[in-house]
Amino acid sequence: MRSEGGLDGASPLYLQLREVIRSKIEDGVYAPGHAIPSENELAETYGINRLTVRNGIDALVSEGLLKRVQGRGVFVMGGKLDIDLDTFGGFRGRAQEINAGASVRILARARRSAGSSIARRLGIDAGDELFQIKRLNLIDDVPYELERVMIPVARVPHLDDTDLSVFSLYDVYGFSGITLARDSETLDIVTLEAKDARYLGVEPGSPAMLFSCEVYDDSDRVVECSDTLIREDKSRFTVHF
């Protein structure tokens, strides 16, 4: 007997569902960074019970094709990202080095025109669109960094469809087939304005490190530029010559 969704009794139903979902991932119907239909929706579509659906999904989770996020759903994972940088680890990597719990809070995200100064950093025209993401990085729930990231829309056009509370930007670059190759960084010392100080949990006028960075892909194009305010009392920089 064949179910409404096209499954039959030739092999265990959960294995058939596994292959149906795999095919939809490979064909781009379920895109990296996006949630697949819920267990209830899949059960109704294919005329099977939720336990069968769950077993099929669990098989793909074990393979690394899907990722469960409690309370959010099941998301499609993309290809793994190759990073060939001497000291490039990112915020989560730095937190892991000191055995601390890292979390990221997205404060704002929007599309906007680049403008002349950001366009120069990104190697695009001033009128080109970019994604601007403002996020607060925390370690053990304590504010540590306030980051503004600018990414050309043309480089990663589907970024606004991706849940950045589930996936990192490095994941998104991997989904888009981007290989990061190098970065260029500058460091300055600034005093915090009232709004930024409030996010970081310190007094206005407190000192902070301003870390500006441009990240390049393996074609030497700028993938993103960022400005990160780092609490002076929570950071220490070591330079090797």
Image (cartoon, rainbow, N blue to C red):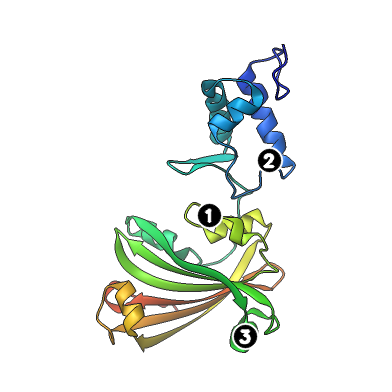
- Amino acid found under the numbered disc labelled 3: Gly
- What residue sits 26% from the left and 77% below the top? 202
Q: Label 3 neighbourhood size at 10 Å, few (<14), some (14-19), many (20+)?
A: some
Residue behind mark 1: 163
Tell me the tag on residue 25.
Answer: 2
Q: Label 2 neighbourhood size at 10 Å, few (<14), some (14-19), many (20+)?
A: some
- What residue sits 32% from the left and 83% below the top? 194
Q: In the image, is residue 211 above or below residue 156?
A: below
Question: Which quadrant holds residue 219?
Answer: bottom right
Distance CA(mark 3)–CA(mark 2)? 37 Å
Q: Quadrant of the N terminus?
A: top right
Left or right, 233 with respect to 222, comes to left
Looking at the image, tell me whether mark 3 or mark 2 is earlier in sequence order: 2
In this rendered view, identify the residue nearer to me: 196 or 217.
Answer: 196
* Whole-percent x, y for residue 126 in the image: 67, 85
* Whole-percent x, y for residue 54 in the image: 53, 27
Q: At numbered mark 2, what does the secondary structure look like: helix, strand or loop?
A: helix
Distance CA(mark 1)–CA(mark 2)? 17 Å
Q: At numbered mark 3, what does the secondary structure look like: helix, strand or loop?
A: helix
- Amino acid found under the numbered disc labelled 2: Ile
Looking at the image, tell me whether mark 1 or mark 2 is earlier in sequence order: 2
Tell me the tag on residue 177.
Answer: none
Furthest-left residue in this view: 203
- What residue sits 60% from the left and 62% below the top? 84
